Image: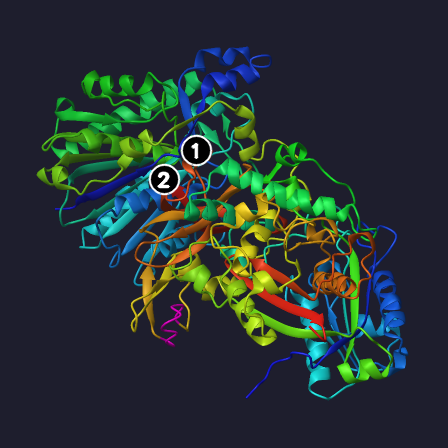
Amino acid sequence: MVGIVAFGAYVPRLRLNRQAIYDANKWYAPGLRGQAKGERSMANWDEDAITMAVEAARDCLTGRDPKGLNNLYFASTTHPFKDRQNAGVIATALSIEQGLLASDVGGSQKAGTSALIAALNASRGGATSLVAASDKRQTRVASATEMQYGDGAAALLCGTEGVIARLVGSHSVSLDFVDHFRGETAEYDYGWEERWIRDEGYAKIVPPAIKAALAASGLKGADIAHFVMPSLMAPVPKLMAKMGGIAETAVRDQLAATVGDTGTSHALVMLVDALENAKAGERIMVVGFGQGVDILVFEATAELAKLPKRLGLSGWMARRKEEKNYMKFLAFNELLPIEKGMRAEFDKKTALSILWRKRDMIYGLIGGKCRVCGTVQFPKSQVCVNPNCHATDSQDDYGMAGLEASIMSFTADALTYSPDPPAYYGMITFPEGGRFMSDFTDCDKEQVKVGTKMRMTFRIRDNDTARGGFKRYFWKAAPV
Amino acid sequence: MARGIKDKVAILGMGCSKFGERWESGAEELMVEAFKECLIDAGIDKKQLQAAWFSTAIDEVNVGKSGIPLSMTLRLDNIPVTHVENMCASGTEAFRGACYAVASGAVDFALALGVEKLKDTGYGGLPGGRGAPLQQLWNANGTAPGNFAQLASAYMAAHDVGYDDLKKAIGHVSWKSHQNGAKNAKAHLQKAVDMDTILNAPMISAPLGLFDCCGVSDGAAAAIVTTPEIARSLGKHDVISVKALQLSVSNGSESGFNSWDGSYFHTTRIAAKKAYEEAGIRKPRDEVSMFEVHDCFSVTELVTMEDLHISETGQGWKDVLNGFYDADGKIPCQIDGGLKCFGHPIGASGLRMLYEMYLQLQGKAGVRQLKDPRIGMTHNLGGSPRENVASVSIIGRLDA
């Protein structure tokens, strides 16, 4: 049996209030008023498609040893690197380099579902495959997409053992229907008229594909309990369901009021939402639209209820902070030439040879554990840090990324350059042993105290814009 | 068996430039200013110098590497010049090098000169940067105030001291140094400041406000050392001798091993203990006449006075508030204004501290002169609370 064996999701903590967007822009674009409802997820300044994908993948791998994973697909239309494998960064962060085929999938809003189909196909031969989909799309000020889009990620583990959602069937068509595009030099999407997209695109491409997928699955429309289909046009999924003979009650919420459309990840984010609510035996249809359409049909199994508890979409959704400061959104997305001061000018050139030597430490947060005295330490070093030991060449790798730490000392630094001042950082200690001075992220003043429990999260440290945007990633501590 | 440095080396002469924002001067002018005073005080000819140690800390914005800048600027007689850098302890390291050269018998006269030209960066505060290429990939996005501010959070937690008490105590540390700096014509900041101004200043890195941070200054200081015998033969009567020179350097136990709680300086405690042993001091609270310690930030001074074994651990804030370290207190600390007001040109600071002790011990400190000091102690702390270089020096009257 091939199917999904685990799921995970990630939604940034910040949720930008849409009324705040509208209030700032209504002088210019009063037509946005109808969309000034609810909120959209907003990546922190230190998040991008890679960091969100790492979080979703970690969530997905909860309670599971990632070693032995055969394939990793990273779907996005906003890969931080054009040439340098983005999936490879995720693999190193997850400490799963060896024996892995990692690939980036992109170029379309259906990249997420296409990657999922590829992963499921790969698993037919017994391989374990992880799909991570993540998008953080740039939008123009006062555009409709600024209101509609959100940032987020989902991850699905595919395999043959412990399947929680069995793949019943799938169907894909590829058509060069250009509802929108983003050219090589563009930062923003350019879209065509919605009515044309609805009538000539969705209405003519999706229903026949649904019909074909149902036929391939040996099912009827009425058999579908969860219809997962994202679309920027709110009524379209209901229309497609109706045309496919699927009950309107099966059409799942698009999370527009709380998250927004997370791009190529969104079909998978909505699938995770469905899986969190599905009962054994229920069928789920997933529709990924974009230059054609992918349709997947799953059936939830009894294993679903046994999946180890994880944050999942609902957990990350609950970890929420409302943001009403639209200026902060603009500044975080480099849409505002904000004064950064001379302290932002320091050269951020990365020695790639060092990064290679130390990739386990920097991307994997791998420390060391001394075989002689048992002391856990970060970084791993040749001479043990324990003053009563100091043994040489005595340390084994010890992963710290999944450990909870607590704050020993801290400050709120208003002097150093930070895109979100003041910069919070401090010494964190791990109860297993080990400590280091860590940047904090996703935190408020009242949370930062001696003793606060912290969780490690993979984030951007710097962006070397002088060399075309080489992002430096490392781990930061965030309140649990 | 080593017997230590005590009374093997005498300070023959010292000099110190005016500290401050010396827009009109480069490092070269500052070096010459300190050296001129030092050479006149020593009463020897430049050609008699046989070796020199030259300290700077931030080469990137200063004179650059090597001993060449000192030799070129002073037109030294092609003698050996060693460039030393050990963060904020650099000046003391230059002094230590010169003293060891004399104590070894290798030379009769050695020069130590430290200089830092910081005010050529275009912004306030210390020149930034994120360290070595590997450190740039993982060290927290921190600053000096941010690193030292964490002492406060850990100290409050370790000793159950309330925020308001701590804020007042560290405020008093700075208040006292401003009182002292106002009496020093060479100091960078020569203005007394009231407590309200200190407590209500803008936050730099919580809980440290503007007045909890020392000045970023340009300056130079120098010393010429010889043996006590030569000093006497040259007609010096009140010979000031070196009693102890100790240095302790972190090995990672604070930053990497879970035993240190962040509320004190592990290295300072070690260096102080060794220094008292070297100098033969058994009861420092009774025997040391005065201190110049590394008050880069007010909370550093507060904690340091415990680590030097003067105040009881966790009780230093009470001594501070009781005026124990004020100019008219039991043991005056930072009688010249300290880093806080005299200023902190990093490579020169250790020598500047010794300069004030040297003046005080000879009774030449003018309006700041303390009554009959016999033993003076200086302390530098380079780096951050978790990884640092701590130096402790004791000088005194040869007959003390």
Question: Vertically, is A11 above or below B399?
Answer: above
Residue B238, quarter of the rendered image: bottom right
Over which residues does the magenta segment extend?
A384-393
Give whichever of B53, A272 is nearer the camera. B53
Subunit under mark 1? A
Name the spot of residue B246 as percent of width and height, x first: 60, 72
At 35% from the left and 52% from the top, the residue drawn is A401
Q: Main secondary structure of the magenta part?
A: loop
Q: Amino acid at mark 1?
A: Glu
Which of the two marks, 1 or 2, is nearer to us in this view? 1
At 64% from the left and 55% from the top, the residue drawn is B331
Q: Which residue is mark 2?
A: A111
At 13% from the left and 47% from the top, the residue drawn is A162
Subunit under mark 2? A
Question: Vertically, is B65 above or below A439?
Answer: below
Q: Are marks 1 and 2 in contact (CB under 8 Å)?
A: no
Q: Amino acid at mark 2?
A: Ala
Q: Is residue A116 left or right of residue B108?
A: left
Task: Report if residue A471 is visible in the image.
Answer: no
Residue A389 among magenta residues: yes
Name the spot of residue A199 as percent of width and height, x first: 37, 18
Q: Which residue is mark 1?
A: A446
